[in-house]
Structure formats: structure tokens, C-alpha cells
Amino acid sequence: MKKIDETNDFLSVESGLFQNERRIWGLSYKIIAGVDEAGRGPLAGPVVAAAVALASPISRFPAVFDSKQISDARRRRLRDEILAVCGVMIGVAVVSAEEIDRINILKATHLAMWEALAKIAKAQFALIDGLPVPGLPCPSEAIVRGDAKSALIAAASIIAKVHRDEIMEGLAPKYPLYGFEKHKGYGTAEHINALKKFGPCPIHRKTFTPVRALLSG
């Protein structure tokens, strides 16, 4: 795995992480958004999507990268730096565990992405992490592992991840038996043990294994 240099403060718009943005800007789209999500896999809590948009190339941008490969402290610093970029446009959407159970996690993720992008009314084109998402508010292109290949997708991954982490930290005192402030709802050994001991709480995804197995058992 590539080692991330967390001392680098800024990216040049000429860097490789902006290659997809430069290509789309070259097609005469002026405002491009990167879109990513956080929280598809956890057993509890919402899925969160973020869109981060810029109008035409800028001279420099925070040194973003795939949010999964940088530390929590670095993600939070980068979130603040992204929000401080002149002209940046941000959209964030949250879809609850209850809605995930109702429509399934794929549809919930697509809904969150749609809502996040729709909050940036001026976006003319979107770069999406992963596979294509149908019916988005503007033309789009999906990039597998886009959070390691696009600066705007990487920025969106950071915004989404930090936002979701803060939601789970805020919910932890309400459901203190589960340790949500530590694992953020993912299926760690500690979380599974708490589930077996105390059963699911209202923010658990009841259609997800092993939550479903515990309920059926």
C-alpha cells in the first residue's frame, strides 16, 4: 500500500490527482463535483454522501487523498481546509438506518449521492466514486477507486467520512452499551460482542447480518 505523506500541505492543480478534473474542465464543463459516500458497510448508523465542487482550475488545493488511508486527525484537518477553499461548494446528505432497511443499502447510497449532488445546484458534471449511479442531477462519470484518482472525489470522501464519524460520536452517549464512538458502527469484535449481549438498538440496520440473525434467533 502506498504510504501517504501527511506533511504535504497542498496539491497543485497540475498534480496527477487532478488529471480527471483537468480532462473534464477541458470539455468546457466549468463546475465539476466529486461525489463519494461513507458508511455502506457498518451494522449501525446512517450512510452519508458528500459532493465537493469547484469552478474551473485553482492554483492549489488541500493535500487530499483516499480518506481510508489517512489518520483521523489528518482527515479532520483536511475537512476544515477543504471548507476554507475559496469558491468551494459542498453538499452533504444523510440516509438513516431505518431508510437503509426499507430500500436496501445500494439504493440508500445512491439516494444519498443524489441528494448531496442536488445541493450543489450549479454543478455541471460529477465524478462519482465506484460504479455508475443512475439518475443523477447532472452528467457524470464513475471512477473505480476514484478516491485515489480524483482530488474532488477524495475531498468528498473526507467530508463524508468525518461527517458520519461525528454523527456516530454524537449518538454514542444515547446508546452507551455499544461503543459507537470507537468503531462508528462497523462490525468489530467489540461491536459484535455488544450486539450478542444487549441485542440491537434503534440505529442498528436490521437487514444486515448479524443483526438480522440475532433478531430472527
Image (cartoon, rainbow, N blue to C red):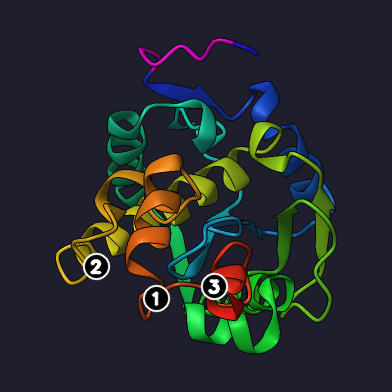
Determine the residue positioned at 67% across, 59% down: 30
* Residue 26 is at least partly visible in this image: yes
44 over 141 or under it: above or below:
below
Under circle 3, the secondary element is helix
**In the image shown, does 186 or 215 lie closer to the viewer?**
215
- Residue at the front extreme of this rendering: 217
Q: Position of residue 168 (x, y in %)?
A: 31, 61
Q: Which mark is residue 171?
A: 2
Q: Which residue is mark 1?
A: 203
The disc, 3 or 1, on the residue closer to the chain's N-terminal end is 3
Say whether residue 152 is left or right of residue 200.
right
Q: Which residues are magenta?
A: 3-8
Q: Which residue is mark 3?
A: 116
Most common SS among magenta residues: loop
What is the CA distance from the residue labelled 1 to the residue labelled 2?
Answer: 9 Å
Q: Residue type at mark 1? A: Ile
102 over 105 or under it: above or below:
below
Under circle 1, the secondary element is loop
